[in-house]
Image: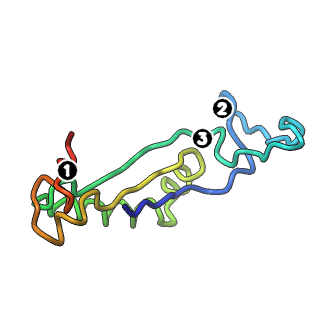
Amino acid sequence: MPILTITSNVDKVRDQGSPVAVQLEDFEENELMPVNKFKKYIIVCARVHPGETVASFIMEGFLKFITGSSQEAIDLRRNVVFKVVPMINPDGVIAGNYRSSLSGNDLNR
């Protein structure tokens, strides 16, 4: 299933409203700094059921907004990691299975 990760690089994080620089000394030598340790995650998905065609238009608008250059989008990418699944049931969309994948699994369960 295709998944997109949309965020910005972490060079500063916010601690109670004020910017705080990430210090590499906070991590052990053998531990890689988790790039998004200080960010919240939001999962956005669409098209569980193939008949939900409007969801594709909504997802397209969301992707254009969140990857855009508006100040709101920049702030969101700075503070949040978006995990986006634009089409949860591509098998159903291609083959016409309304509730199930090609393997017959109901994706709602």
How far is disc 1 from disc 2 in space, using C-alphas? Answer: 46 Å
Q: Quadrant of residue 46?
A: bottom left
The residue under label 1 is 105
Residue found 61% across the figure and 56% down from its top: 8
Name the residue beneath numbered marker 3.
Answer: 39
Q: Earlier in the sequence, mark 1 or mark 3?
A: 3
- Packing grade of label 3 (10 A; few <14, some 14-19, many >=20) is some
What residue appears at the point 79 percent right and 42 percent down from the top-left corner?
A: 22
1, 18: nearer the viewer: 1
Answer with the quarter of the image where residue 89 lies: bottom left
- Badge 2 amino acid: Gly
Q: Left or right: 58 with respect to 32?
A: left
Task: Say what amino acid the circle numbered 3 marks.
Answer: Lys
Q: Nearer the viewer, mark 2 or mark 3?
A: 3
Image marks 1 and 2: residues in contact by CB distance under 8 Å = no
Pick whichever, 19 or 105, lies toward us: 105
Residue 92: % across, % down: 17, 63
Secondary structure state at the residue bearing disc 1: loop
Indicate left or right for 16 with 2 as reference. Answer: right
Give the image quarter of residue 96.
bottom left
Compared across the picture, whether 41 is left or right of 51 comes to right
x then y, percent, for residue 66: 44, 59
Circle on res. 42:
none
Question: What type is the residue that disc 1 sits on?
Answer: Asn
Image point (49%, 53%), residue name: 72
Q: Quadrant of the C terminus?
A: top left
**Disc 2 marks which residue?**
17
Task: Give the alpha-carbon distance from disc 1 to disc 3, as whole Å.
Answer: 33 Å
Nearer to the camera, 8 or 65: 8
Q: Position of residue 73 (x, y in %)?
A: 49, 56
